[in-house]
Image: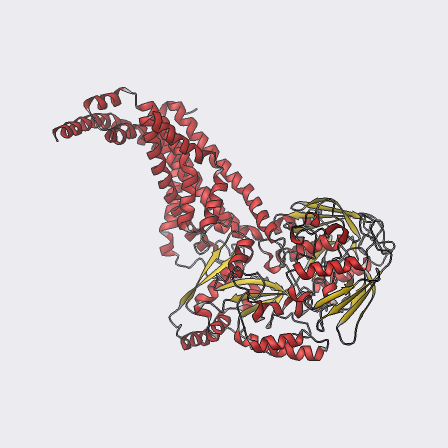
């Protein structure tokens, strides 16, 4: 009991000391981020997409599956909704507005799984090294060497496309990158002075991993997470484009895949959902770049 | 450390870009895979939006061709008035690929288009469905309908120089009888006498009204016995396709890649003097309908089966002729199979409600772009056996549909499972929206490809599904199979058998009667009565009969636009200029 107590105090002290030094760079980073025009543009773009996806539906109530008008109505033509209609006469405005829900939900879910699992594996491997590292890294490599898209296609096809299977498939084929990245960060950090100090005070492994090393690996991981989210969105769109999506849930990728058959006469059915994906991924990418610059100000302008 | 962070970020970004590019590439490949799977199926592999562009089944009269098509046809016949010129290469394209070239064991458009170029059949058929000489210069059906005599031309040889004899005809018929998916086609054949090498006498167990139709190019290619009769499984025989394929038709294989491209060249010893005109045919397999349209527009192809979406574009283009003519005998009917074994659809009333709620006219107008006409019986309109006076559920009356559901205790709504793959998605989603209006929730379940879908449907693992089934010239060949009790094949089942698991013994008796007489009036009466019963019991909801359009370069003369369309030999085709 007493031992535990001292351990906690020691770790808390170490963590507190660490956080104190970390807090100033956090504010510094935020300031740098907000001063970065392209990063702010990315943030605004992404927020706009979020608002469109999660707020706009309350003001634009419509079932995106409803057949509301003639098929292939160009935007701006008579009787056409704002963004025209697709090959079945569905409202493309509704498809774009509602389609983001599935896309973002799947991508966010997949990103959480990727980061969660990847960080866990990477942290354990990097921290413990030796046999644990060997086993975990061979396991990671197994997933890394499989061609991601093909593996995901097999997984989704095998278990029938649904929001969950797509999410899990994306996470399954994508977590290895994050694991390797985390492992590298842990390898770098675990021999630094403050980690040794925490260890000397008697902090438990769990504490060192979660409270000492992880916060210091965060800048890199946050940057990579934004990119992972973008990756997952493209991946979901790619799978849906290939027809590997639950067709009862409209999504941007699905809309592109479905509109493709008629693109010689109906460019808008693929263009608008495509623009939505483009804007989202661009926004995330700019945010990621901005964070990168903010956390590593010395590299700006490179 | 910082450097490392950046390089990882940029690496990730590069991967993002790569993934996107990869997904595009994979998309192209994905389409190809689907299509390749379709290749061996009867409803052709014209790609994702193929529903509209596949088939037509009017009985030869061209009055369903739209005005522009008629004009084009007129222009074309004027241009064709010159003397045929030999030589040249004709380039044809289709979506998908082939499994092989042996039509005795494999039905389908994909096999039949190249297959009818490299293999000759006993008979050809003219626009009035009348047999014309081909390998058989004369033929006779005995008065009792129990024997058919074929007199073969005496100068016909296979591509390896071996003469074609009655032995080969017998071998081909028996192979088809044992292996071809259309069981009724040669079912009544009892024996074939080949005493005279130039005469084949076929003995039947009962009169078979479609026996001559079954000798059409796509249905009975004559294959060399000396190559194939080695005891191997005919369905998997190594000589079914390949550079060394030995056929009997006007063209022989020059190079063979079942998934990409087949090149055919003129067979100099073809049994019809001076034919074929063409030196070479290229059959290019593309990944989807868009590739077909773009290739045609670029001038890469001389002739394609035109996807519905492209018809306006090509009709307006002087370089092309677009016609809704050809392929009439195929007789495609699009329908919704209702699984009579599924609990919710086990009653006639529930199925009628579904049929009433489905907006057939809207489907023809929107999904088929108006290039499809009404069909009420599953027998192609225009056929003498098509009965227009049957139960008609085309008028959409939601109250009536709901009342019918209530009458069988389904008024509170229920869910239905609707498997499909890329090919039927638009159709399925359209029907999903229709049925939502009477409280039925349809779960459209997109499966990865054709084999999965056919396994689901054949195995009865569905409530309803969108389907396209062909008449193949005569109800005995293409219609009966969908209704006969003995064609309800237990799981794993067979696709395009009686997939609704429908059974009515009265219908069976009528179909048997119609299928064993040459008397057209008698056949008509039996089919009229049978289809009246079937239509009222709604195992299938008939959606319509799509028109089949072909687009070709104006230089193509004597185009293959007869009742079998592209699935007939192109030995008369020539190129002007």
B73 sits to left or right of A13:
right
State whether residue A294 appears in this view.
no
Which quadrant of the view contains residue A24?
top left
Task: State how the image is colored.
Answer: secondary structure
Which quadrant of the view contains residue B507?
bottom right
- The x, y position of residue B323, in whole percent, is 71, 60
Q: From this viewpoint, which residue is outermost toward the left?
A: A2
A69 sits to left or right of B322:
left
- The x, y position of residue B503, in whole percent, is 54, 72
State whether residue A136 appears in this view.
yes
**In front of the other: B183 or A38:** B183
B544 sits to left or right of A234:
right
**In front of the other: B213 or A40:** B213
Number of numbered markers? 0
Q: Dividing the image into 4 quarters, which one contains the N terminus of chain B?
A: top left
Q: Is residue A299 above or below residue B264?
A: above
Q: Residue at x 47, y 63 (%)?
A: B432
Q: Is residue A222 above or below residue B246?
A: above
- The x, y position of residue A91, in whole percent, is 47, 57
A139 sits to left or right of B289:
left
Q: Residue at x 19, y 24 (%)?
A: A202
Which quadrant of the view contains residue A5?
top left
**In front of the other: A27 or A151:** A151
- The x, y position of residue A292, in whole percent, is 38, 30
């Amino acid at each position: 009991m007493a031992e535990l107590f001292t351990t906690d105090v020691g770790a808390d002290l170490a963590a507190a000391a660490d956080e104190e030094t970390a807090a100033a760079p956090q504010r510094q980073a935020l300031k740098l981020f907000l001063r970065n025009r392209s990063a702010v543009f990315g943030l605004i773009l992404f927020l706009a997409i979020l608002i469109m996806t999660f707020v706009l539906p309350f003001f634009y109530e419509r079932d995106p599956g409803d057949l509301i008008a003639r098929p292939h109505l160009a935007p701006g033509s008579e009787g056409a909704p704002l963004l025209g209609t697709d090959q079945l006469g569905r409202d493309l405005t509704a498809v774009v507005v509602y389609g983001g829900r599935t896309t973002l939900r799947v991508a966010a879910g997949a990103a959480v799984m990727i980061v969660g699992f990847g960080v866990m594996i990477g942290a354990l491997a990097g921290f413990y090294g030796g046999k644990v590292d060997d086993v975990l890294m061979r396991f990671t490599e197994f997933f890394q060497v499989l061609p991601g898209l093909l593996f995901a296609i097999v997984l989704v096809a095998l278990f029938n496309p649904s929001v969950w299977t797509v999410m899990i498939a994306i996470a399954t084929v994508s977590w290895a990158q994050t694991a390797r990245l985390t492992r590298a960060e842990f390898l770098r950090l675990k021999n630094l002075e403050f980690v040794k100090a925490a260890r000397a005070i008697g902090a438990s492994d769990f504490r060192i991993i979660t409270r000492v090393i992880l916060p210091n690996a965060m800048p890199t991981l946050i940057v990579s997470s934004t990119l992972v989210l973008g990756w997952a969105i493209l991946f979901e769109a790619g799978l849906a484009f290939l027809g590997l999506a639950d067709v009862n849930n409209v999504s941007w990728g699905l809309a592109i895949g479905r509109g493709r058959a008629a693109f010689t006469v109906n460019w808008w059915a693929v263009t608008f959902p495509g623009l939505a994906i483009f804007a989202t991924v661009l926004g995330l990418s700019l945010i990621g770049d901005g964070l990168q610059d903010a956390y590593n100000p010395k590299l700006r302008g490179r | 450390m910082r450097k490392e962070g950046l390089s990882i970020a940029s690496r990730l970004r590069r991967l993002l870009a790569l993934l996107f590019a990869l997904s595009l590439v994979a998309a192209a490949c994905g389409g190809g895979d689907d299509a390749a799977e379709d290749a061996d199926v009867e409803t052709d592999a014209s790609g994702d939006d193929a529903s509209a562009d596949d088939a037509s089944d009017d009985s030869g009269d061209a009055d369903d061709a739209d005005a522009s098509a008629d004009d084009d046809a007129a222009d074309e016949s004027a241009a064709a008035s010159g003397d045929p010129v030999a030589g040249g290469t004709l380039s044809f394209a289709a979506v998908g690929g082939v499994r092989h070239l042996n039509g005795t064991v494999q039905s389908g458009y994909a096999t039949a288009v190249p297959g009818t170029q490299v293999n000759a059949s006993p008979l050809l058929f003219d626009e009035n469905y009348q047999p014309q000489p081909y390998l058989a210069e004369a033929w006779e059906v005995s008065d009792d309908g129990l024997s058919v005599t074929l007199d073969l031309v005496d100068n016909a040889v296979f591509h390896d120089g071996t003469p074609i004899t009655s032995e080969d005809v017998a071998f081909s018929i028996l192979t088809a009888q044992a292996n071809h998916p259309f069981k009724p086609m040669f079912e009544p054949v009892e024996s074939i006498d080949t005493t005279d090498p130039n005469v084949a006498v076929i003995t039947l167990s009962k009169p078979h009204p479609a026996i001559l139709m079954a000798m059409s190019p796509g249905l009975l290619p004559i294959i060399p016995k000396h190559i194939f009769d080695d005891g191997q499984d005919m369905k998997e025989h190594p000589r079914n396709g390949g550079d060394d394929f030995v056929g009997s038709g006007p063209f022989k294989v020059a190079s063979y890649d079942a998934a990409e491209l087949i090149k055919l060249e003129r067979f100099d010893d073809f049994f019809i003097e001076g034919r074929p005109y063409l030196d070479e045919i290229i059959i290019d397999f593309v990944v989807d309908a868009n590739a077909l349209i773009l290739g045609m527009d670029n001038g890469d192809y001389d002739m394609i089966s035109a996807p519905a979406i492209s018809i306006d574009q090509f009709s307006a283009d002087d370089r092309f002729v677009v016609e809704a003519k050809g392929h009439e005998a195929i007789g495609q009917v699009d329908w919704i199979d209702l699984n009579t074994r599924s609990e919710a659809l086990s009653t006639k009333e529930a199925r009628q409600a579904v049929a009433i709620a489905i907006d057939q006219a809207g489907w023809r107008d929107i999904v088929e772009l108006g290039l499809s006409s009404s069909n009420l019986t599953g027998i192609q309109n225009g056929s003498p056996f098509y009965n227009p006076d049957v139960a008609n559920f085309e008028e959409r009356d939601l109250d009536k549909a709901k009342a019918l559901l209530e009458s069988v205790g389904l008024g509170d709504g229920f869910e239905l499972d609707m498997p499909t793959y890329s090919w039927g998605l638009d159709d399925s989603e359209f029907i999903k929206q229709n049925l939502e209006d009477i409280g039925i929730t349809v779960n459209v379940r997109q499966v990865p490809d054709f084999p999965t879908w056919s396994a689901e449907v054949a195995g009865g693992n569905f409530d309803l599904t969108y389907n396209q089934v062909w008449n193949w010239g005569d109800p005995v060949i293409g219609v009966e199979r969908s209704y006969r009790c003995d064609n309800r094949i237990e799981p794993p089942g067979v696709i395009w058998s009686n997939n609704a698991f429908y059974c009515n013994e009265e219908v069976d008796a009528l179909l048997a009667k119609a299928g064993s007489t040459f008397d057209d009036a008698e056949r008509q009466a039996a089919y009229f009565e049978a289809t009246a019963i079937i239509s009222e019991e709604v195992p299938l909801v008939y959606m319509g009969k799509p028109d089949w359009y072909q687009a070709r370069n104006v230089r193509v003369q004597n185009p293959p636009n007869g009742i079998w369309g592209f699935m007939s030999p192109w030995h008369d085709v020539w190129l002007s200029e």
